[in-house]
Amino acid sequence: MSRNSPLEISRALVAAFSTQMFRYYEDRIPQDASVLVVSNHRSFMDAVVLMAALSSPIRFACHHYMGQVPVMREIVTGQLGCFPLEETENRLKSFFSQSQVLLQSKQMVGVFPEGTEPMVKFTVPNHLGEFHRGFAHLALRANVPDLAVLPIAIASLEEVNTSGFPLKLLSLFDPSEPLFNQGGWHPLVIYRRVAVLIGRPYWITPQQQKKYHGKQARSIIAELTEHCHGEISNLLRQGCY
């Protein structure tokens, strides 16, 4: 499979769903650098929309079950180049080890720090949940020169929001995920018109890496997490109205 196949597939899928996409602040996309993309997450379309918007393949960390379900596994991992995380007890270690190798080879890595929860609940387009801080730890310990953390907001302007399949069905593929052990249906959000708004990158400097190894580690992690959450929150408000 060629390196550009995920990008070509992403563009084809956006076209297949007849999705109109609008991109803003593209001048903020770092050039000739390793990039960790951080974005909000409500739809199965988010990864392909981001790749099409940035005109680049992005290696997304995805939920463990996506590497277990036949057909989905071939599309998500084989065609789009996503890497599924391991089960709950090894998830963080798996995320760090796989992402670090990709960033060191200057591949673009994508993370959805809200986790699985917004994908299994019906939410409004401008909804933004709390961020898990794993991406911030990755950025500061990755040992990658010229690393930019790039917050991006996906703002749905028009969508079809429907039920997909029972949540309990997913527990067959990942019984360790408590969110799947409940009644109800997995929502499917299909974008008809969507805005992709690119935030201000946060550059990881040697000085920040030193803080991460000292007494200020907690504050530098909070600073990076709050920068990305604040950027995406502000851009969502701008894009959704």
Image (cartoon, rainbow, N blue to C red):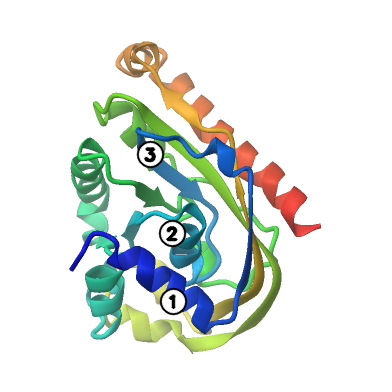
Name the amino acid, label 2.
Answer: Met
In the image, what residue occupies the spot 45% across and 53% down? 112
Classify mark 1: helix, strand or loop. Answer: helix
Task: Say whether marks 2 and 3 touch (CB < 8 Å).
Answer: no
> Residue 1: x percent and y percent?
18, 68
**Upstream in the sequence, badge 2 or badge 1?**
1
In the image, what residue occupies the spot 48% across and 58% down? 50
Check the image and report above or below for 11 versus 229: below
Separation of residues labelled 2 and 3 (CA atoms): 13 Å
Is 236 on the left-hand or right-hand side of 187? right
Provide the residue designation for mark 2.
51
Provide the residue designation for mark 1.
12
**Looking at this view, is 48 or 98 the one in front?**
48
Provide the residue designation for mark 3.
35
**Upstream in the sequence, badge 2 or badge 3?**
3
Question: Which label is found at residue 36?
Answer: none
> Residue 190: x percent and y percent?
58, 78
**Looking at this view, is 227 or 101 the one in front?**
101
**Upstream in the sequence, badge 1 or badge 3?**
1
